[in-house]
Amino acid sequence: MYDDIPDYMKEFLSYMQNIKNRSANTIREYYYDLRDVFRFLKLYKSKVKIKDITPELINETDISDLDIEFLRKVDLADLYEYLNFISNIRSDKATTRARKVAALKSFFNFMTFKQKVLDKNPTVELETPKLSKRLPKYLTLDESKALLHSIEGKHEKRDTCIITLFLNCGLRLSELVSINMKDMKDNVLTIVGKGDKERSVYLNNACQKAISEYIAVRPKDVKDHEALFISERGTRIGRRTIEMMVKKYITLAGLDPKKYSPHKLRHTAATLMHKYGNVDIRSLQQILGHESISTTEIYTHIDSEQVKEALESNPLNDM
């Protein structure tokens, strides 16, 4: 799939995968982001006006012929023109722009300090777009119960198991679809998370019950015998199938399907564990598989109900 990029980009992707041990998803993001940047740069440096650079034109642009000399001519001003383009013309979100900046920095660091083909790294002073900190959206305890009670139909046991694992274990969508039968032993589930990092997740009674009831009805004649969750076609269930399934039950529960997704169920699990289980942040970090404690801190927010209780507890409230 990488035949439409220069060899030096392929070498970078290989380095990130085999030496830095980045996940397949991360490698794919690097590929798409770098391809997008250099398609724009090729057009921009060939004097195509920015207002004339359309998505169709970018998609049609071949960059497989870009050599090291082209790379050496890329400077900081060029990169800011690209960021200006994706921000003001294409309206990419700040998170998307920040991801692309991270990809560019990693790539140019590799070309400068590992490959040593560049004298200057144009990303040294390239600033990352500032991200606004927003509280994560999550379901309340009552909404979570309503979601579980909304599950029905032919795949009720399977779907109940999936939602239960999301809400109790805080799994990522990629982690859930990759669960194999052999990953479960007694009350422990082995998860392979970001960067192929393995962690153990202890299954509570609700998870054990849901898994047991699903396995009792799990199809026997399947194409993928290793996968825990099986699709209608007898293969490992896909991410899109789960996303659509979650939206369906969110709607049946009387909630807004535009606000909630599988990742919001991960937020919900973390919030409920912290709020009702008094789980400390270090334990929460381990459960969620976060590399940095700062990532976990967004789940330990104080919600509006707690703020209201705090204000009402003020002794001056009764005066």
Image (cartoon, rainbow, N blue to C red):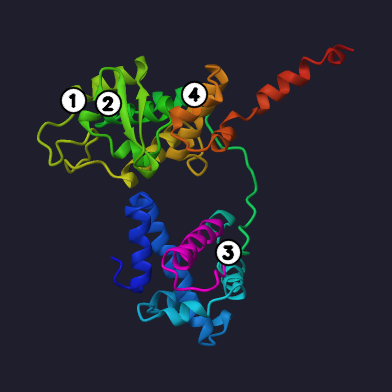
189 in magenta:
no
Apparent side of residue 280 relative to residue 218 in the rendered image (left or right): right
Say which quadrant the C terminus sits in: top right
Could you tell which of marks 4 and 1 lies nearer the N-terminus? 1
Please give the label number shown on residue 157: 2
Three-letter code for the amino acid on which mark 2 is drawn: Lys
Task: Tell me the CA gap for discs 2 and 3.
Answer: 41 Å
Could you tell which of marks 2 and 3 lies nearer the N-terminus? 3
Single out the residue that lies furthest toward the left. Answer: 221
Describe the element under mark 3 as helix, strand or loop.
loop
Q: Residue at x 48, y 60 (%)?
A: 106
Mark 4 surroundings: few (<14), some (14-19) or many (≥20) residues within 10 A: few
Task: Tell me the CA gap for discs 3 and 1.
Answer: 47 Å
Residue at image mark 3 = 91
Tell me which segment is drawn in magenta.
97-123
Where 102 falls versus 70 (above or below)? above
